[in-house]
Image: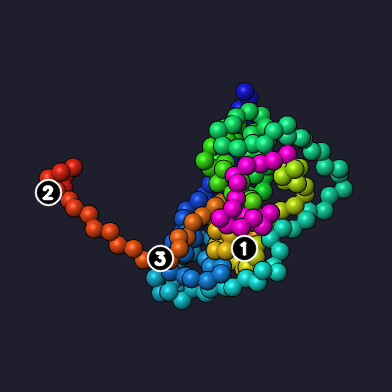
Amino acid sequence: MNERPRLSPEARKWIPAAAAGGLLVVVVFAGVAVGGGGGNEAVSPDSAATSTTVLIPDSVPVIATVPTTAPITKTQLGRTLSKGMAGDEVVELQERLTELGFWPGPVDGYFGDETRKSVWAYEKLVLGVPYSEPTGQVTPDMWDDMQDSFTIAPRRPNSTPNHTEIYLPEQVLAVFHDDQPAMITHMASGTNEEWCEEVTISPGEYGNE
């Protein structure tokens, strides 16, 4: 198989921003919590404590149609793709997910965990599937729609060009660079339930002192 393109360094550098965005879920409880920021500015504890929580109405569209004069050439799936499958069809899926800003992992033709998480995020964010009901599978009809000319747009109003958006109802995290999606992925913020479990540790066992 020929060498396949991998995620660009420009997109990979936003992975730490996504991790920082994940931490925001712990301290902010809202329909949508967003971490703003532009460039390489450091965030102090004081500024973090006063960061703004923005509630985004359901009416804000996440899909923006991209006008095109050239006809769209689509390929057809002969099967439903799911975890564990491999081949050129999976390569095409991974390439398209990457183009849209999702994070399917390396474009290697193998439908692994990262590709499935990207499909989960696509189902929830683009198709409107409830957060607990994504299948992680790509049907022929779903693949046909995925090839339409569109992009994922930021929901946050008046945002800085570089920022992170966390969609709690959909359980999706999106990192934007210059208002373009650099990484969109599935996330899990938990149920806010408190729990406590007692454990017994034997001194000296497994290095315990």
Side of 95 relative to 173 (left or right): right
Image point (62%, 63%), residue name: 161
Q: Give me the residue at 43% from left, 66% from top.
A: 192
Task: Single out the mark in the foreground, 3 or 2.
Answer: 3
Residue 126 covered by magenta stretch: yes
Q: Amino acid at mark 3?
A: Glu
Return the residue at label 3. 193
User: Is residue 100 one of those drawn in magenta?
Assistant: no
* Residue sitting nearer the eye, 160 or 102: 102
| Label 1 Cα neighbours within 10 Å, binned few <14 / some 14-19 / many ≥20 | some
Display colour scheme: rainbow
Asked whether the residues under the numbered discs 1 and 2 touch, taking CB atoms below 8 Å apart as contact, a structural biologist would say no
Q: Picture coordinates of residue 81 (x, y %)?
A: 64, 36
**Type of amino acid at the residue the image marks with label 1:** Pro
Residue 131 vertical placement versus 59 (above, below) = above
The image position of residue 8, as x and y in percent, is: 58, 42
